[in-house]
Amino acid sequence: MKIHILFAFVACAVFCLVAINEVHAVGRGEILVTDYPSIQAAVDANPGRMIHVPAGEYRIEKSIDIRTSDTGLYGYGTIIQTNPDAPIIRIRNTEETRLEDLTLTRSEGARKTHRDGVLVFQGQRFQLMNLHIIDNHSDNAAIRIHQGHDGRVEGCEIINYKRIGVEDRTANPLYGFAFRSIIGDGIVVNPGTQIRIAHNIIIEKRIDSGEEAKEQFKLGQLTEGRAPTQRGKLAPPGDYVPNWHQGSAITVGSPDQTSHVLITDNLIENAGQGVDIQADHVTFSNNIIHTAVVGIKCMHGSRNVVIANNNVSYMDLWGLVMLPGTAARRAENGRPPNVTRGNVIANNIFSDFGFGRDYHVWKSSDMRSVLYFEASPEGAPPLSDVIIQGNLVYDPSRDGSVADGNPAGDGPRYLYAVTIDPQLDLKSFQFSGNIFHPGTRGVSNVDWKAR
């Protein structure tokens, strides 16, 4: 009898707890997109609310536009964009917008696009969390932050974000040409401040940059751009450029406006450039970059940048390149200077250089170097004040190891572990505690120890 009474008491308690939870759920007023004709209708009817997108497929023909603050979407639903001429989601002029857990993709036949997957325009305190952006084959970005501030892009998975397209430089008088390329970016901040990019996976599985693709798509061949071709001083002498594997897994640009960006714990594979830093006060740490033409690029006036504790493998041109770039300038006409100075490169591992997908393009290049420091364009402030500490450049040929089926015992595939442009002031570079396995021409093209 006592057991039955105890059982009844427990059952009653459980029932009450469930009922209370249901009341609380109703009290919270969870909004379901399935109660509306479309996701956009749900967004329009509920400004300032979070809207649940349950598991299932939701086809759209226009971008989902979020234009009111505190509005967002969350859930395990899959949103399928059927229109190649529209982004999947646009967030414009809002605060506290959140997207979480959604899968965003494009339908068969609409995957090749010129549009971003997610565009945040003038967003404040936004959160893009645990998104899965699949098959947005774009010459723009899977996620683009334009004029974003105090935002987070965390835990997202970006798979197959590139396409075959045209890198168009006809509008820039220094270049004045366009060429066929692999193109497309994973995450772009341009411009933005106080942004955290963390724990994301950015992988291109569909497009390969091997010799077969080069021939099939005529990659690197000059072609017509939006403006007529008028070759500038940085144009190639012939009708081919080798740097046809374009795009970056992560880009932070607009060096005059972008600052205070944290990029950490991301996993990147098969990129043109792993990361392209064109900003001040950036910390790039604890990331893994596997297979790219260039692992880490820091240029166009990037000041007070920390590059630390990254694992960079299978690069084919540079593991890390740092240079002022054409946007660097001295203070002029009331504008502050834009310089690449005061940076730290510490505790990074660079390994298996030359065993990536693009080695066939760069194996004859005289620029192949794991760490590469370049001088300024004419008249620009030079690169200076760089600490290089505790880094390892590791040559697998020392072990007679095999990388992707290629014997690594035939010597290193880089010329130098470190290349420093002779025009630079060696006194402004501080080396300590590094291990640099020599390339085919030695450890470095200059003797920084004798400076």
Image: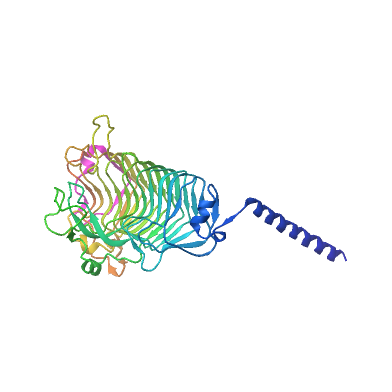
Q: Residue furthest left?
A: 237
- Left or right, 71 with reference to 189: right
Q: Is residue 145 visible?
A: yes
Q: Position of residue 417 (x, y in %)?
A: 25, 52
Q: Is residue 445 magenta?
A: yes
In which quadrant of the rendered view does residue 162 lie?
bottom left
Q: Is residue 101 visible?
A: no
Q: Position of residue 146 (x, y in %)?
A: 37, 46
- Left or right, 283 with reference to 100: left
**Is 94 or 284 nearer to us in this picture?**
94
Query: Does 68 appear above or below 290?
Result: above
Query: Residue shown at 88%/66% (left/top)?
Result: 1
In which quadrant of the rendered view does residue 301 lie?
top left
Q: Quadrant of the C terminus?
A: top left
Q: Position of residue 58 (x, y in %)?
A: 48, 63
Q: Is residue 413 magenta?
A: no
In which quadrant of the rendered view does residue 116 lie?
bottom left
Q: Residues in magenta?
A: 426-451
Query: Residue shown at 75%/57% (left/top)?
Result: 16
Query: Does 398 appear above or below 65?
Result: below
Q: Position of residue 268 (x, y in %)?
A: 37, 57
**Is 81 or 161 nearer to us in this picture?**
81
